[in-house]
Structures are given as structure tokens and as C-alpha cells.
Image (cartoon, rainbow, N blue to C red):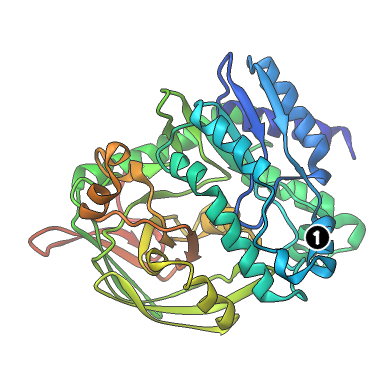
Amino acid sequence: MSSDFEKNLDKYAKVIVKVGLNIQPGQRLLIGMPFYEFLGTPIELAPLVRLVVTHAYKAGARLVEVMWNDEQMELTRYQHAPRDSFEEFPTWRTDAALEVAKSGDAILIFASGTPELLSEQDSELIETFILTTMKHMKPTIDLRVKNAMNFAIVAAPVDGWSEKVFPDIPAESRKAMSWETIFDICRVKESDPISSWNDHLTELAARSDYLNKKQFTALNLVAPGTELIIGLPKGHIWESARMTSQGGIDFTGNIPTEEIFTMPHKDKTEGFVSTTKPLSMGGGLIENIVFTFSEGKVVKSTAKKGEKRLQKLLETDEGILRLGEIALVPHSSPISQTGLLFYSILIDENASNHIALGRAYRFSVESGVSMSDTEFATVGGNSSLGHIDFMIGSGSMDVDGLMGDGTAEPIMRDGEWAYEV
């Protein structure tokens, strides 16, 4: 790789540590933990991980540990392991993550993998593995949705991902193109990436602040294939990527990020909505999804591709049939403007308005972090093992905020912000 690549890789590692995690002196850092289909950090990312470790120690980290993972070993399990063994789980991984989360230390997750690595494997085994992972990760995720620790979920390419995203360029150029794209959408090529990120996060925070002052009772989303009203709970909080842990540490949960988001009321979504980008999950794609909601619950769902996989996801638990998040992203976002499908929820969701079925974030409603499960449900918060994002935005979507008296104010027009900050 060129000297420019090495320079940008180091800058990216610094962005991850300084902007994403904001590691504080004396904190421990765990890199890699089970996260849906990802068991740990891909060994392909070792050069970047080493730089992250270096910058973490320079920032004052007390101890940095890495959970490694090898995709090919995952594939080997599906090919050769006993069919009745997929409810077994390496609990040492979840035990370690839970210990770090409970102590308020930092966790870094690389959401990186080959999109269709398992496309030819038994889908029931894949679904069993994902559900098993969700169950074992629940105690840690319960702390993460309360911002008990500073964490970051970041993007980085592996070979199989590069081949999928850039199939039309020479094979020897795909990895380099993947890294260049990541550097672009993560603002790494700026002369001062940290300053550029601070400016970006400040603007997103201003967008959230504007909507928090409005306290709309609902959102009305209209686009081809979509007519959806999403009720919002009293005291809902619009958040952006810059959040604060319970320990008082500011951090950026996703890199890249272009969204502002809040918590819908779990019982107050009505209408229908169509996805505008495929969902890559469980070793395959689910495309052209249409959900119909009544009293907050999905009462009908269809997909032109991967419908069986979709229906299995919707059997996770009762909460997976209700919304846990609504996020707004302008169609002109840098990720959207690439025109690429990244086959990664982390990246693709930042190209489009999106909804998530399943678990809501406790910090998205006033006093939500300190509420009991019953209290959280009473104010409209949704609980589930899963949290699955579906991209629904486009350059044709209008979004209005609805007041209690039914009056509407524009939030987005043709996929772009309709208010100034």
C-alpha cells in the first residue's frame, strides 16, 4: 500500500479513538464483542487494530484487549459442525463484554464481514445462531442501550465485502477502492479529521435540538410506497451520534454517521412503508420489503426476495413486531451520494431515513435510563432481543411533524431538510 494509505489508516485509527470512543485515562478497552452475526474482530483488520491499540494507549488506556475472529472458521462450522450444536455459544466472549460494560469501560465493534459468506448454508442454522447470540448478548446490550459505557461501532473493509461492493473493477483494485471509500465517508481525508468531525457532530446536534424543542406528537412520512404515521411518546428525545455515557464521557456511537433519531411510541404507528435498500443479514439479502402497521404492530409483511428469512426474523419475539427507532438522514448525505449499496446496515442506514423494528434505546425518552421495564413500556418504549434497521428514505420522501392539534410542519421535503439550524 502507498504512503498515503498508511497515513490515512493512521488518521482513521485516531478518529476511532478520539471521536468514536473518546478513550479516557485509566479506561480499559475491549475491541470486538459478539454483535448479531459478528463474533469478534476480523483478523484481516489487524493493521488497523494495531494502530487503534497504539492510539488508545497514547490516550491513556489502562488495558486494551482484542477478541479476534476468522470468517473462514465460521464457515467451516456451518459446513462440518453437528447440526444440533448451534445453540451452543462461547460464553467467555459475552462474559468479558459484560464485565467491561458493567465497569463503564469502552467497547469497540468492527461491523465488518463478507455479505454472502453463508449464502449457501442452512438458513435455519444461521437463524438459530443469530438468536442464540442475541440471547447471550442481552445483558450487555441492555447496558449499551442505557449508555452505561462509551462505545463505537465502526466500518472497515474485508476482502469478501470489497468484492461484493465493487464487482465491476479489477480484482486487484477492489480492496484499495474500499479503503478509499471508507476514508471518504468517514472524513479521514480532511486535513484535520477531528475538527471536521466536531463540525459535523455540532450540526447534527443542532438538528436534534430543534426537533426536541418542537416535541411533535407524531411524524407523517409520505413517499412512493409509503404512507406512515409514527406516534412519538411524551418526553421523547432526538439524539445524534454524539452521546454521553453514564460516566459523563462524550462519544460517537457509529462511524460513519449522518443520522438523528428518536424512539417511536410502540403502540402508535399506522399505515404502510416500503424499503428503498436491501437488508443484508444472515448470509443473504432481503429486498423490496413492505410493512403494514396497525396500533403500532406489524400486521402484514412481504418481500420480493428473502421473504422466508424476513418472516423468521419477525419471529424473534413479540417486541420485534414494533418500532424501536425512527431515524432521519438527508438524501444528499455523503454515503447516499456514492450511489453504492454497501451491504452493511451500519453504512447503508446512514444513506437513508430508516426505521428499526425491535429494541428502543432507553436514552431516547426522558428518565428512560432509570425506568423499570414496566415503566418504560408504559411510556411507549419497546423491548426486544433484536434491533433491525430497514432503509426507507429516498429523494422522494416528505416528512412532517404533527402537533397535538393536528397541524403539520415540514421536517423534510424531497429527502432534504426543510428547516434551518
Q: Could you tell me which residue is drawn at 23 percent across and 48 percent down?
A: 375
Which image quadrant: the C terminus? Answer: top left
Quadrant in the picture for residue 213:
top left
Disc 1 crowd rating (10 Å Cα; few below 14, some 14-19, many 20+) is some
Residue 335 screen position, x and y as percent? 58, 54
Residue 401 screen position, x and y as percent? 23, 59
What count of labels does the image hold?
1
Find numbered disc 1 in the image and state the secondary structure of the residue it sits on: helix
Task: Give the residue type that dot 1 points to.
Answer: Gly
Judge whether residue 268 can be spotted in this image: yes
Residue 108 screen position, x and y as percent? 62, 37
Left or right: 383 in relation to 155: left
- The residue indicated by pointer 1 is 160
Quadrant in the picture for residue 65:
top right
Left or right: 34 in relation to 302: right
Residue 399 screen position, x and y as percent? 31, 63
Q: Could you tell me which residue is drawn at 47 percent across and 57 percent down?
A: 385
Q: Nearer the viewer, residue 406 or 124?
A: 124
